[in-house]
Amino acid sequence: MSLLAAGIVAAAPAGAQQPRRARPSVAPPPAPATRIPTPRSVLGFEPGEDRRLADWPTLLRYYQALAAASDRVDYRELGHSTLGAPLVALVISSPRNLRRLDRYRQLNAKLADPRTLQGTRDTQEALRDGKTVVLITSGVHSNEVGGHFTPAVLAYRLASDTSAATRAILDDVVLWLVPSLNPDGVTIVARWYNRTLGTAAEGSDPPELYHHYVGHDDNRDWYAFTQVETQLVVDSLHNVWHPQIVHDIHQQESDGSRLFLPPYLDPIEPNVDPLLVDGVNALGTAMAWQLAGEGKTGIAINAVYDAWTPARAYQHYHGGVRILSEAASANLASPVEIPFDQLATRARGFDPRQRSWNFTNPWPGGRWTLRDIVSYQADGAYALLENAARYRSHWLANFLTVEWRAVRGWKGWPYAYVIPRQHQDTIGLATLLGILHRGQVEVRTTLHPVAIGSQRFPAGSYIVVLRQPYAAFAKTLLEPQHYPDLRLYPGGPPLPPYDVTANTLPLLMGVTAVPARDSLRIGLSAPVEPPAATPGYPGFSGPDAPHVGLYRSYEASMDEGWTRWVFDTWKVPYVSVVDSVVRAGKLRDRFDVIVLPDQAPQELLEGLSRRYPPPYAGGLGAEGVKAVRQFVSDGGTLVALNDASRFAVQQLLLPVRNVLEGAADDEFYAPGSIFRLELDTDDPVARGMPSQSVAWYESGPAFEVLDSSAVRVIGRYPADPERVLLSGWVLHPERVAGRAALVEVKFGAGRVVLFGFRPQYRGQSIATYPLLFNSLQLTPR
Ligand SMILES: [Zn+2]
């Protein structure tokens, strides 16, 4: 401890002052290529300057000016964002490489699918002449504002620098740089920041989702592909260019490490090729080493972030490594002061105040600014590119090895999954096959009937053979997950995963997928296109359609956004309802049903703090609660999703008890899992559903009925604890076994429908959408 303290005292004066400011990535010296426009010349300020953010149109003008002036940079528009902004990419390489770009695309495509290589000479040529393809993406999370500027700083450096290191990068790497994966959010955050500058709300998050539909979950969409931004980047970059390296630039809390780089923590999702994990470990560690050599402190590796879910890591299932970086945040563009003794006492995998093997040189504390963030991020990305250039032949050879293994098939994996057709191809089936197709998985049909064990499937059934380049992507999405039982210490509380633990699409989408252990020895078709199906549900058009109000908190809830996305996609008409509308009362005059999306009871009640200007502070409040109670008494239907059910139970004093209220993690734990759900199909809410379905369980309540004359149980978990879990992780399932998961409570002339789970989870749980849609149609019209 004393050694550490001494080191900090010595480091503080030097570290806090000049060297960072002088780094070329932030304030590049005038290079010979003076005609290359600096970011400052377009933005009007230096990227990273305190209290300065730019909106997306301004940043776009810089990238256009840069590409116009530099023969190392081309500008491509990929399409348009949810709110209509241009989503763009820059391709950066030597002028010679840019002229031959299509040749490099073809060489890389051969390595990505070794079945297309024609003999040893073809292979040697692809390995010898190919370039390392790197995709750098930034800004998926728009309040991580360093990511708004780092691409501009990096692109300028690559366009203007004449050093040998930069020339090597340009010669040996084809870089695709996406300056923002969420352009809409750049403008949402910049406008809010500028509006609140100098007020109590300076540096606060905007009172709306920074992605129109999904907010922070826009980085959980890399297998479901629900959002247009994900689709554009997958279709036009990942699937065309097959990058060996993907670097995604993020920010984390202010009081941990200054920068996280991989290796990731365990668990690593087991279908990820081991050689990719080796690549992640080597590259992340090399970047940390290089940054440390440049004098940067506070870098943590093998900490906080695991690699379990495919939702953030498309490339781990497509032959590439994913290098996440997470720089410490300031308050948006406003600097923060963090004395050493206010750094977090613990972070997962290291202690921000203690030197350790994976956190070799603690940051001494002090002022932390946007300039620091941009400096760590831009120099980190440059270090990654240097590695990609220096080890070009290794990256390409290992990429080919990963794809060869996938094509030959992994020992112990099923030979294939058979997905039977349905009488009418449902939206669930069409969506699942569409996801596999978008992920470049070859789906075929059987030319003959198939028998797997005692099950027989007719000719024409869909089949996914797990001997193809992206077999791991298919397997991960088609099989149940068995999350390892990780504890803080033996017998201790669970070690929480970084994100949810299940992603089994057949369960979520109501589709059957049967593994075939052995080769089927039957004829198969060529790869087929997925069937088309148009989302829609009866009862939501014409004069009898219910009048739906969807509560929208200023303490923006991602589940609210997902609900809006599902309603818009399935053409369910609704009106978004904010606090002032609820508090004004007379809700029954306007609405038949009001939906409270998943949100903590406290947030619903109190909303944003008084730091925010009107009308954003205050939540529903007592007036809002009174109005909601009156609405239900007057005959309306209140539908409460997941955690919002606890709010409804507490505020309307409903005769049910949450059996999990106050349960500690070691008493019950299921951090995003798929449970079995048994339904009373005579109930209107379960109309059209099978009696056995699923529930996306994520920290919701489970109900004990206190007054059976007022409460009807529509769905419950199986009485046998062993049957509760279908995919993911659960500790002590006996706590919910046999408990109610979905109930309707009579209240005055109306009713409250309480979901203990998320029926429209991240736009994926199509199997349970009917439960939500039916519950919107209960008020007689
Ligand atoms: Zn982030």
Image (cartoon, rainbow, N blue to C red):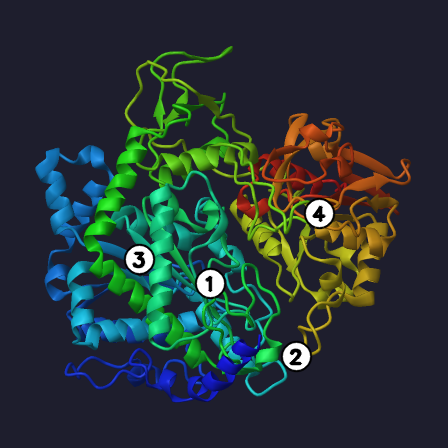
Near mark 1 (Cα within 10 A), the count class, few <14, some 14-19 or many ≥20, is: few
**Residue 197, how many percent across, how many down?**
55, 84
Q: Secondary structure at mark 1?
A: loop
Three-letter code for the amino acid on which mark 3 is drawn: Leu
Give the label, 2 or 1, closer to the camera: 1
Residue drawn at the location 57% of the way across and 50% of the way down: 497
- Looking at the image, which is closer to me, 307 or 421? 307
Give the label, 2 or 4, closer to the camera: 4
Q: Which mark is residue 613?
A: 2
**Which quadrant of the figure contains the C terminus?**
top right
Instruction: Give me the C-alpha separation between circle 2 and circle 4.
Output: 32 Å
Three-letter code for the amino acid on which mark 4 is drawn: Gly
Indicate yes or no: mark 2 CB to ligand 1 under 8 Å.
no
Give the residue number, with chain letter if any, for mark 1: 357
Q: Can see residue 201?
A: yes
- Looking at the image, which is closer to me, 11 or 161? 11
Residue drawn at the location 59% of the way across and 57% of the way down: 558
**Which quadrant of the figure contains the N terminus?**
bottom right
Instruction: Give me the C-alpha separation between circle 3 and circle 4.
Output: 38 Å
Give the residue number, with chain letter if any, for mark 4: 700
**Residue 632, how many percent across, how many down?**
82, 51
Give the label, 3 or 2, closer to the camera: 3
Q: Secondary structure at mark 2?
A: loop
Give the label, 3 or 1, closer to the camera: 1
Three-letter code for the amino acid on which mark 1 is drawn: Trp
Give the residue number, with chain letter if any, for mark 3: 135
- Is 40 left or right of 573, judged from the image as shown? left
Question: Quick one: label 2 or label 1, which is nearer the N terminus?
Answer: 1
Indicate yes or no: mark 3 CB to ligand 1 under 8 Å.
no
Question: Quick one: label 1 or label 4, which is nearer the N terminus?
Answer: 1
